[in-house]
Image (cartoon, rainbow, N blue to C red):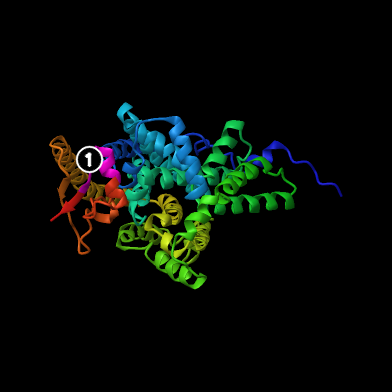
Amino acid sequence: MARAAPDRASYTMHAQAPPHIPARDRLFPGEGAGLVLCFAFLLWANAVTPLWADDYCRSMPFSLPTIARIVWGNYNFWTGRWFTTLVTFVVLDLRPYGGLVAFAVVNAGLFTFLVHVVGHLCWRVAGRPALPRAGYGVAQCLVVFLMLWWLPRTIGEVALWKTGAIGYLWPVAGEMWVLARIVSGRMDMRGVQYAAVFLIATFLEPLSLLLTLVLAGVTVQAWRQARRLPWALLGAHAAGTLVLGVAPGNYVRMRTMTPSPLTDRLDGLLGNLGSLFDPFWLPFVLLVGVGRCMGRGHTPFPACLRAGRGWMFGALALAYMACLLMFPREALAARVSFPASVLLACYLACLLARCVAEPGFGRVMALGCTGLVAAHLAIVVPDLTLLARISRERDAQTRAQVARDQPVVLPRVTMGPRHKLLYVRKDIIFVGINPDPHNMLTACYARAMGASSVRSAP
């Protein structure tokens, strides 16, 4: 029997919300005010965060031919993340012309967009529970933001550091947007959106591979159910994954690393997986746990932990971590686990969305949100202010010594039991000048500041 041709409504399954719930493209009650508060804080945080590490290595006089030559060389001899590298060079090379101001606005906007996407995606996946009043909606939005800030292991490396934010926050925001389109069934896009999907897929190898596999599974399911197949979306994303994965630079770089057999990679992966969870989870788990206890009469334990289809985010987080087996153990930096942390935060957001529907939980959430916001500001504002002050003093000392035509020697800044050159709580950022003037990052700083050499000393 011939398969019946589906109509266009098959692409918008579940897209029509009940009359008392906003349409898919509109903000939830109170969400707008919450997003404005998030954006204002993030804009300040981006503005005060100085350049760090690789940022200096990618700072030079702006020249598109030079940038294109370096990006092409990196693609062939160091990394396949060509679009990431291109954007980073453009942003940092335009800093004398306002490039960092533009970055602060765009980066703050993308984090705020991620908060919005996660809130709507989790509400849909959780089964579209009832929404709170506007006042409590602000609190819900802020709690989601705080989850995305505090649950990852090292938020500064992936959200504030210029090079790291472009390489990790930007692809996560993009891929979560793609996932939201998949869940809502809105996979029919315009040409420019398919181009954006292709570029999103060229950022981060394991995340790109995971979303391509998800799209392939959705395509197979659509074929089995005689629905329209999302060939264009799958093709655009798979093409980006392919361009990223086949880059010669990936394999050149891998040969420079210590050989890492599968057992060694698995051991590193298990350590990375275990360190996803730290004491900063406790206040959020406690808040959600109170909500689940208040609703125990409607959904018994442990069924309530499924959070509708929210459990799938936990499965995706495990699948993402499994994709990290493609990397040698040496390459498993803490920031690589950021997408898994976001997916786990999505699971908690699904539980939170269902808790909000419980009578009386809104007041609990508002009280908890107030305490979490106060703690957040009390920790982050002094840390980032300290970071900005140390950076200003370091740059001023460097310029003064350069003006006297002297080799630059900077006082060593150490904090923490491991004597890191600069450590701010929750790994918000890590900055330092190495005692070795030949260290790559120290040499990059010297070049960017016009110094013959730079080193730190006690």
Q: Position of residue 20 (x, y in %)?
A: 50, 38
Check the image and report above or below for 259 versus 180. below
Check the image and report above or below for 283 versus 373. below
Question: In the rendered structure, which segment of residues is drawn in magenta?
Answer: 444-454
Give whichever of 315, 252 is nearer the camera.
252
Q: Residue lying farthest top?
A: 97
279 part of magenta stretch: no
Is the C terminus in the top left, top right, bottom left or bottom right quadrant? bottom left
Residue 420 visible to the viewer: yes
Residue 360 visible to the viewer: no
Q: What's the residue at 47%, 65% (across, down)?
A: 300
Mark 1, residues whose alpha carbon is within 10 Å: few (<14), some, or many (≥20)?
Answer: many
Quarter-of-image position of residue 267: bottom left
Q: Position of residue 24 (x, y in %)?
A: 53, 37
Give whichever of 130, 271 is nearer the camera.
271
Q: Position of residue 181 (x, y in %)?
A: 56, 42
Q: Is residue 212 left or right of residue 168?
A: right
Quarter-of-image position of residue 275: bottom left
Give whichever of 277, 385 is nearer the camera.
385
Q: Position of residue 222 (x, y in %)?
A: 70, 49
Q: Which residue is mark 1?
A: 451
Q: What's the residue at 37%, 61% (across, down)?
A: 289
Q: Is residue 311 left or right of residue 406?
A: right
